[in-house]
Image (cartoon, rainbow, N blue to C red):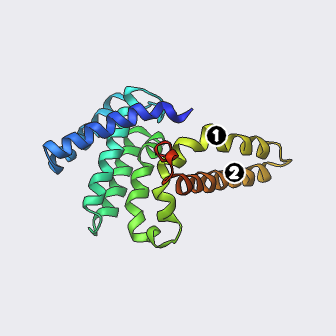
Amino acid sequence: EQLYFFPLLFLVCLLAHSVRRWIGMYGLLALCTASLFLGLAAFRRSANGGFSLGAGTWAIFVYTSGFLIYRCRNSRWLLPITLGLILFVVLAIGPPGLSKTFPILLLAVMRPLRFDAAPLLPRIGEASATIYAYHSPFVIKPWLIAAAMLPTSALQFTGALGASAIAIALCTLLYYRARSTPLGFAIL
């Protein structure tokens, strides 16, 4: 199901990396700013997924923001500026703005909260493309169906979290087992 996003992600990556290579970080900042204002002006209520101009515009904004956040990762102003930007978007378009900017918040708080110090998280991060590609179509669906059959909503919620953990674990294991084999091309 989520494989529809690969072509869109490819185009976003191609655009961002081309701008960064040819124009530099100021070009990336201009692209980030332009995508933010285009998103606010034309795609306020667009879905966060799907192959559409709205999803692409917000994806460019989030992707280029990631580059800029990494560039400023040691700045004491990173978190206040990020929170201000999120507040600006939420005030401009309402609650849907939070879902469009939440990845930026995660990127901004990762360094101060030292997520990289957790022993398994960097390894899971290395396998993230494999997790993204294979978790939904092949791994998580049967576990979610089983969780939906549990008798209470609390157990179903717990089962859904467990299904997610199982999917992450199995896809991470697949990545590390297959990456140096002839099947390595398929793990991303």
* Residue at point 34%, 28% (across, down): 42
Front position in the image: 81 or 72: 72
Secondary structure state at the residue bearing disc 2: helix
At which x and y percent is residue 10? 36, 36
Task: Name the amino acid type tagged 1.
Answer: Phe
Which residue is under mark 2? 163
- Disc marking residue 138: 1
**159 left or right of 21?**
right
Badge 1 element? helix
Taking the spot 76% from the left edge, 40% from the top edge, the residue there is 145
In the image, is 56 to the left or to the right of 31?
Answer: right
Asked if residue 143 is positioned above or below residue 169 in the image, the reply reads above
- Determine the residue located farthest toward the left in the rendered image: 23
Q: Quick check: 111 above or below 186?
A: below
Query: How packed is label 1: few (under 14 Cα within 10 Å), some, or many (20 or more)?
Result: few
Quarter in which the N terminus is drawn? top right
Q: Quadrant of residue 141?
A: top right
